[in-house]
Image: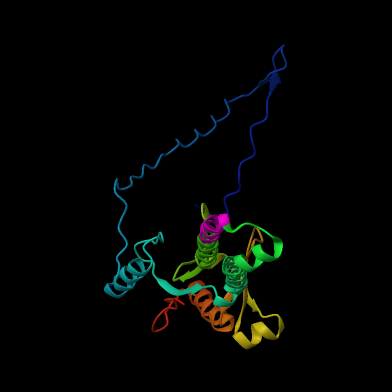
Amino acid sequence: MDNNTQPQDPPKPVAYDPEGNPLYATPPPAPAAAAPTQYVHMSRAVEPVEVRISPEVKRRHDESLEAFPSLNLSDHEYIVSAIRRHPAGMWFTVIITALAISVIFGMMMNFPLIAEVLGISMNGYGLVILMGVLLTILFLIGGYAAIWVYMSNRFFLTNESVIQEIQTSLFSRKEQTVSLLNIEDASFDQKGPIQAMLNYGSIRLSTEGDETTYLFDYVSNPKQAIAILNNAVEAFKNGRRVDMPDSFNDD
């Protein structure tokens, strides 16, 4: 096309009909037809493409499932660190159970003296012994159940997420999973001389978006646990492989 060519002015009407419509000496050019709509059809595979799993990741995944079969891990997910609560949190339960059993045995052993002082017949001594044994068994069962609930609370760090198992009673259990991509802040806290001397404390996770905070108490060596977690989060967000320690914790 010649660059000097000037665009033509639209034709002007030479007259108008009785209805006011313009009349032209030559009919105006018909408007260009709109381009037909084009549709692009795409197809997808019926079966999803399987992600290739390296032998090393497969080995770590199998070891993690063998150690913790209750966890729901993806095919390319493995445990980096597993944290249980510190035994210090069981002291209260152990002390209360031991005191209660001591009082029961003391009353059973000294019942003849108590009966003599109070003027109570010894005919019911066998019933007192039976009740004492039953109460002792109940306190032992209750103490064991409380310790089991306490130790069933666990915290797992995988190469993809953080999993927290929360056990509040014998029949109340839930699991929380947070992707490493959503973790915004991870910190630990130790309060008081006892926690500092025994080296336990709390770890806290904050997530992006909904700003949810996750707390896990009585963590053994919380500084080391947070260091491993922060390294995993940084590696995951930067597209690097999340490496695990020589052996993950289970104590």
* Observer able to see residue 168: no
Q: How is the image coloured?
A: rainbow
Work out whether residue 229 or residue 4 is closer to the camera in this orientation and state it. 229
> In which image quadrant can residue 139 be found?
bottom right
Q: Is residue 233 left or right of residue 209?
A: left
Depicted 108 relative to depicted 232: above or below: above
Count up the numbered dots.
0
* Residue sitting farthest toward the top: 18
Q: Is 110 within the magenta? A: no
Q: Residue 20, relative to residue 163: is it above or below? A: above
* Main SS of residues in magenta: helix
Query: Where residue 244 sits in the image (x, y, percent)?
Result: 42, 79
**Magenta highlight range:** 123-135
Q: In x, y percent, where is residue 121?
A: 62, 57
Compared to residue 99, the image places residue 28 above or below, namely above
| Image spot of residue 28 (x, y percent) | 58, 28
Q: Position of residue 15 (x, y in %)?
A: 70, 20
Residue 225 falls in image quadrant: bottom right
Q: Residue at x 66, y 58 (%)?
A: 120
Whether residue 122 is visible here, answered yes or no, is yes
Give whichever of 52, 34 is nearer the camera: 52
Above or below residue 11? Residue 246 is: below
- Residue visible at 60% across and 74% down? 91
Q: Is residue 133 found inside the magenta-colored segment of the image?
A: yes
At horizontal 50% and vertical 74% (from top left) the residue drawn is 83
Q: Nearer the viewer, residue 168 or 2?
A: 168
Asked whether, in this view, residue 81 is left or right of residue 23, the answer is: left
Q: Quadrant of residue 223 in the image?
A: bottom right
